[in-house]
Amino acid sequence: MDQLDFRLILAFTNAYSSLYREGLISQEQLESVLILLDNYHKFTAEELENKLKKIFPDIPE
């Protein structure tokens, strides 16, 4: 993982953790996002977007 990838993953992890602490997302959603972020390199950008939409189905496009 290069430095940019690490920074992006850290930023996303911190952002989603904050949403969880504020009660805006569930523990299940947080865990799903963290697993997705751990495996981000296995997916295309479109696949990542689709997986996030499945985790957060109530968010309008």
Image (cartoon, rainbow, N blue to C red):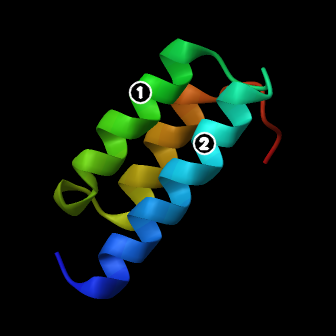
- Residues under numbered marks 1 and 2 in contact, where contact means CB atoms less than 8 Å apart: no
SS of the residue under disc 2: helix
Q: Amino acid at mark 1?
A: Ser
Badge 1 local density, few (<14 within 10 Å), some, or many (20+)?
some
Q: Which residue is mark 1?
A: 32
Left or right of 48 in this view: 12: right
Left or right of 6 in this view: 21: right
Q: Compute the Cα span from label 1 to label 2.
A: 11 Å
Above or below, comparing residue 25 to residue 15 in the picture: above
Left or right of 26 in this view: 12: left
- Image quadrant containing the N terminus: bottom left
State the mark number for residue 7.
none
Badge 2 local density, few (<14 within 10 Å), some, or many (20+)?
some
Of residue 30 and residue 46, the one placed in the foreground of this image is 30
State the mark number for residue 16.
2
Q: x, y (%) of residue 4?
A: 36, 85
SS of the residue under disc 1: helix
Seen as rendered, the residue at the extreme bottom is: 3
Where residue 16 sits, quadrant-wise, is top right
Q: Amino acid at mark 2?
A: Tyr
